[in-house]
Image (cartoon, rainbow, N blue to C red):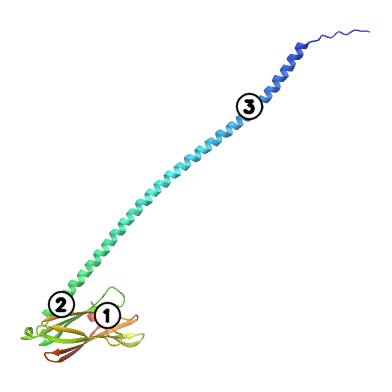
Amino acid sequence: MRLVVRQHRPFRQLILFLLGVVLISGGIWLFLDYDQWGYIQQRLAASAQRRSLWEQNRALQQDNEALRAQLARFRRQAQIRDRAFEEIRESLTDLQRDHARLQRELDFYHDVLGSSGTGRGLRLLGVHVWSDGEDDRYRYELVLGHLGEGARSRVVKGEVRVRVVGELEGRPYTLEPGQKERGEPLRFTVRNYLRLAGELDLPPGFEPKELRLALRQESPVKGSEEASFPWLEVLN
């Protein structure tokens, strides 16, 4: 029988146990530390992405503000331009009206000055028609003169009837101011010269061909005169 004697080493076992604990703890720490670093890296990446998005958003906001300012500037310029165009248009319209008025004044004096040698008594000196600026609406002016020796000392009264002859829907049609079929004549009183004005509202589709005038003197003596003028000749 052999007797085996083994040495009992409790300190060594303790060291091995502690070493195992240290190794396990170190492994756990390394695992947790790696996971923590991954989380930190993700947070840093997310933070960098958020900062990039914030900077892009800020740049877009600045661009939008610049575009809005530019748009507002363009709108102001367009308003100024439109206002200038409107003022020019109104000024041009006023000039055209003044031109038409002066032209009518010139026509009147031309008719008056050209009345010498046209005879004595009541005479139709001029006929003028012009557009009123609207479709199928016109204005007309008649110039009457009481001529001859001693005419200034007498007053002449009478009436004049205006007719427009043309075609409506391919058929002959006669229009008188005021009514479609029979308009009221224009009453007048003249000593030397007189301008009679009126309006002509033509029916849609009406094609004027001729302007006819019937002048009738009632006092101090009776008399009458009729005249017709091609529409295009009296249209200014």
Q: Do labels 3 and 2 touch, CB within 8 Å?
A: no
Label 3 to label 1, Cα distance in Å? 102 Å
**Residue with the mark numbered 3:** 33
Q: Relative to 204, is 31 above or below?
A: above
At mark 1, the secondary structure is strand
At horizontal 58% and vertical 34% (from top left) the residue drawn is 42
At mark 3, the secondary structure is helix
**Residue with the mark numbered 1:** 200
**Foreground: disc 1 or disc 2:** 1
Question: Nearer the N terminus, badge 1 or badge 2?
Answer: 2
Q: Position of residue 94 (x, y in %)?
A: 23, 67
Q: Position of residue 155 (x, y in %)?
A: 10, 85
Farthest left residue in view: 150
Residue 108, numbered label: 2
Q: Amino acid at mark 2?
A: Phe
| Residue 14 visible in the current orientation | yes
The quadrant the C terminus occupies is bottom left
Q: Do labels 1 and 2 touch, CB within 8 Å?
A: no
Relative to 128, 11 lies left or right: right
Question: Nearer the N terminus, badge 3 or badge 2?
Answer: 3
At horizontal 25% and vertical 81% (from top left) the residue drawn is 232
Label 3 to label 2, Cα distance in Å? 110 Å
Q: Quadrant of residue 34?
A: top right
At horizontal 11% and vertical 88% (from top left) the residue drawn is 121
Relative to 119, 98 lies left or right: right
> Quick one: label 2, few (<14), some, or many (20+) residues within 10 Å?
many
Label 1 to label 2, Cα distance in Å? 20 Å
At horizontal 42% and vertical 44% (from top left) the residue drawn is 62
Front residue of 24/157: it is 157
Q: Relative to 111, is 25 above or below?
A: above
Farthest bottom residue in view: 222
Q: Quadrant of residue 212?
A: bottom left
